[in-house]
Amino acid sequence: KYIEPGYTAEKNYHNQLHDAIKAKDENRINKLKSTSAYAKNSMREWLESIIFAVFAAAFIRMFLIEAFVIPTSSMEGSLKVGDFLFVSKAHYGIRMPMTVAMVPLLHNTIPILGTESYLSKPSLPYKRLPALSPIKRNDPFVFNWPAGDSVYVTPKRSWAAFQVQQQPEARREVAGQKLVVRPLDKKDHYIKRCVAMPGDSLQIIDNQVFINGVASANPRHLQFVYFVKSPFPLPLKKLDEWGVSLKESDPNRGIYALDEDQVGRIKAIDPQIQVERYQPLDHQLFPYDTAHFNNWTIANYGPIWMPQKGVTIPINLSNIALYTRVIGTYEGNKLEIKNGQIFINDQVADSYTFKQSYYWAMGDNRHNSEDSRYWGFVPEDHIVGKPILIWFSLKNATLRDGINWNRIFRSPNKVD
């Protein structure tokens, strides 16, 4: 049996050091530490500890649990701006890393520098381990933003290329910025509620979601934007106690994001107070085809069918807009429309079989959520994980306003 000489020498060093310590021979201890190549000084020990800690944290973050913070009000009512979450990557199946050259513990940008924190190549193909549990309808879930492959990055947020084309506000924000192309697993993280599963048919009628023709149960704290007309200023302290997000409201203009219970409480303050639901102006909605889907709004939308792996559907010029990005971008086909015909990989096509399943995501703050109504389906390979715990929560996302003690160590599905 071969024993590597270095192993024997290191073992002898540790044995001699142990004997010297046991005999309390300080001279011998100091001599061994100063002359042996196997002695560790404090700097080396600290360095090894730091490297191990970073490696362990990166492993846990990559494969098991990652910490997230709620940055926007799109899930207000259920998940608030300033909530810090732990998200399990094992529940829906661990997605193996695709981007392998990256800065540990950073997602896609380096703070202060503002540069991307990874190299697009080399990369690995998509692979997911078996799930501990399936995604359930109406569960909150975390995923990579499907539209985030080509973005303009600003200090506040990322803007997708199609948003810059459609919205003057976006064009002003990204002036002078370069277009960044991101791999799938480095797209921004979003958290929304899964309202439709693969194979479901979804329709929104007067803000009510219907799945397969049946009204879907609404989240307990479903919110809409309201105009509140009052002859006197509303008591902000009371609004805060009732859970109204003042950070996302505009009291000077009487604009508030409210759930049904909060609307009732405000009306009960005084009979002179009027509360009217705001009807937002619709940006151009998915699938951006006004010729065939001109009457779709965020309050009245669909019907639309969720693609399911292995299912074949007919495709034609009247429905191809719904599945253009699915077929061409998410499933890697060459899609063209020429002379009134659809070509997939240079072959005339009147049907298509999906390679993976897709989901529909919506925020609980229905008037203030960029969700599937704006950018379409969530592919299965974009799913990151399941929120399992709120481990910290700041009021209005600032320590100055205090801590939401009643939200700490609560399940995202059970918190008020």
Image: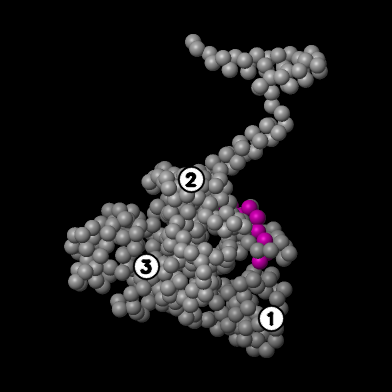
Which kind of residue does numbered mark 3 sit on? Leu
In which quarter of the view is residue 314 placed?
bottom left
Image height check: is 300 above or below 15?
A: below
Q: Which residues are magenta?
A: 388-396
**Secondary structure, magenta segment, majority class:** strand
Mark 2 and mark 1 in contact? Answer it, CB < 8 Å. no
Dot 1 corresponds to which residue? 234
The residue at the point 52 percent across, 55 percent down is 116
Image height check: is 49 above or below 363?
A: above
Q: How many angstroms separate mark 2 from mark 1 (CA)?
A: 53 Å
Q: What SS does tag 2 mark?
A: strand
Place of residue 399 in the rendered image (x, y in percent of width and height, measured from the top left):
71, 61
In which quarter of the view is residue 47 placed?
top right
Which label's residue is closer to the chain start, 2 or 1?
2
Dot 2 corresponds to which residue? 101
Q: Is residue 379 visible?
A: yes
Locate residue 305 relative to residue 162 in the image: left or right: left
Q: What SS does tag 3 mark?
A: strand
Which kind of residue does numbered mark 2 sit on? Ala
Place of residue 413 in the rendered image (x, y in percent of width and height, measured from the top left):
54, 58
Place of residue 232 in the rendered image (x, y in percent of width and height, measured from the top left):
70, 86
Dot 3 corresponds to which residue? 202
Q: Is residue 223 magenta?
A: no
Which label's residue is closer to the chain start, 1 or 3?
3
Crowd tier of the residue under label 3, counting other residues whose Cα lies within 10 Å: few below 14, some 14–19, many 20 or above: many
Q: Is residue 133 visible?
A: no
Marks 2, 1: nearer the viewer: 2
Mark 3 and mark 2 in contact? Answer it, CB < 8 Å. no
In which quarter of the view is residue 240 placed?
bottom right
